[in-house]
Amino acid sequence: MSRFAEPMARLIEELKKLPGIGGKSAQRLAFHILRSSDDDAEALASAVRDLKAQLRLCSICNNITDVDPCSYCTNPTRNHRLVCVVEEPTNIAAIEKTKHFNGVYHVLHGTISPLHGVGPEHLRISNLTRRVDAGEVDEVILATNPTIEGEATASYLADALKKLRVKVTRIATGVPAGSDIEYTDEVTMHKAIEGRREL
Amino acid sequence: MALKESEAIVLRTYPMREADLLVTLFTRLDGKVRGVARSAKKSRRRFGGALEPLTLVRAVYEDRERQELTRLDSCEVMDSPLTRQMTYPRLVALGHVAELLDEVLPDREANDALFRLTVSVLGALRGPEIWMPLTYFELWLTRLTGFLPDLSACVECGLDLEGEPAFYHALADGLMCVDHKRLASSRLSVDSRRWAVQMFRAPVAALSAEPWPKSVGEDLRKFLMQIVQRHLEKKLTTQPMLAKLD
């Protein structure tokens, strides 16, 4: 028999499915929700419901959005001829934080991964090539992660996009700002020296 | 328990808990070992790019009493596939090598010959050519694991197949002569069998100069993978992706 009333046990079980939430944390969160006001509990429940009901993928860039096309794709102040390709929607936030990129995005939703049976046909590439093929793009920046899967995905996209006569660039790899060369790993240092630039 | 140090090849990583990675290593000292790299998922500071698949590392790990998983202390990169351009065909080829090793190797059983084979094949896979190193790896892997049947005689009647047509079948234990071939058998060409003999005599580096389009040795690779998949009793994930490459 459960130690808690059925609705409480059910909420704890559901919360335990969230990343980083164990049994004790789930129990604490469930009791917090129980103690909160009806309005707060309802607001949480409706936020979860709306998240699933209202969010979808942007038909242009595949970003997660509540309006289609997304706010980046409809923003007239952004440079729509400069497209940055990222693996996941969460990568957009990291680039936006720099306040240095004014182009638009394209989200692949993954990388090529032979060990997981993920080939190029499983990624969202077709609407990118359609955009480029329609002459809407001057430059594509490939901002996939510098892992072997990210690098191979970038190489695959570069080959496919160059056939469409568009400028294709890759983000630089190197020593993180504010770090110490002494503690930089061998692969990063190799890439940093390989990608050095003249001053 | 004492820390162990060994050359190792990273085969795979899986996310584990919030911040850790479960790493499968092919170590020279202990064979296939699974270990936990603490905080490796959240922070790259400690392991950097050392846990990318098919990276040759000097691994320091600690076996824990009554625990199957070791604790991975550190990994120093000796050779990384990321130091050369990573193309899609090269990624599929490296993935195939990693999958084969992960599936075929038993846990905690050192295999120095297979380790040396893998290191030399990874060296050959640095360039754009993938089909020769892959054929070499598959051939030697099946031989070193004891799966490879005799390529010179019919498994049914013992007829010498030198210069004769030879056939293989998914349910047969070896090559068959024209009289004993089964329905829907595939042919293994004389040229491919000659390549196999040459590969048993020469190191992979000595064969690298030859141009190897996909069509060369294709029947041999199909034969070898049929043997491996039959022993594993499962299909390899990377096999259909390799078949689709040009």
Image (spheres, coloured by chain):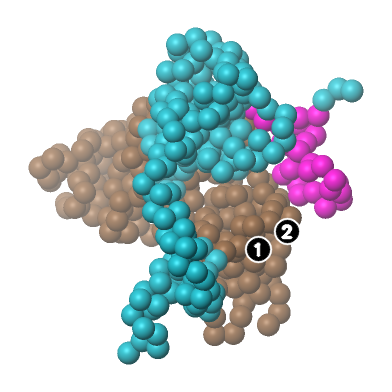
Q: Residue at x 33, y 47 (%)?
A: B225
Callout 1: residue from which chain? B
- What is chain B's hue in the picture? brown
Callout 2: residue from which chain? B
Residue situated in front as seen by the camera: A141 or B57: A141
Residue situated in front as seen by the camera: A163 or A93: A93
- Of callouts 1 and 2, the N-terminal one: 1
Q: Residue A52 magenta-drawn?
A: no
**Residue B245 position within the rendered picture, expressed as x and y whole percent measured from the top left:** 39, 30
Q: Which mark is residue B46?
A: 2
Determine whether, in the image, residue B27 is placed left or right of residue A50: right
| Residue A163 versus residue B60 in the image, above or below | above
For the question of whether residue B235 can be seen, the reply is yes
Residue A134 occupies quadrant: top left
* Chain letter matching colour cyan: A
**Residue B45 position within the rendered picture, expressed as x and y whole percent measured from the top left:** 74, 55
Amino acid at the residue labelled 1: Ser
Q: Residue at x 21, y 38 (%)?
A: B186
Amino acid at the residue labelled 2: Arg
Highlighted range, magenta: A170-196
Give the alpha-carbon distance from disc 1 to disc 2, as whole Å: 8 Å
**Residue A48 position within the rendered picture, expressed as x and y whole percent measured from the top left:** 43, 55
Q: Badge 1: how crowded within 10 Å, few (<14), some, or many (20+)?
A: some
Residue where numbered disc 1 is placed: B39
| Identity of the residue furthest to the right in this view | A199
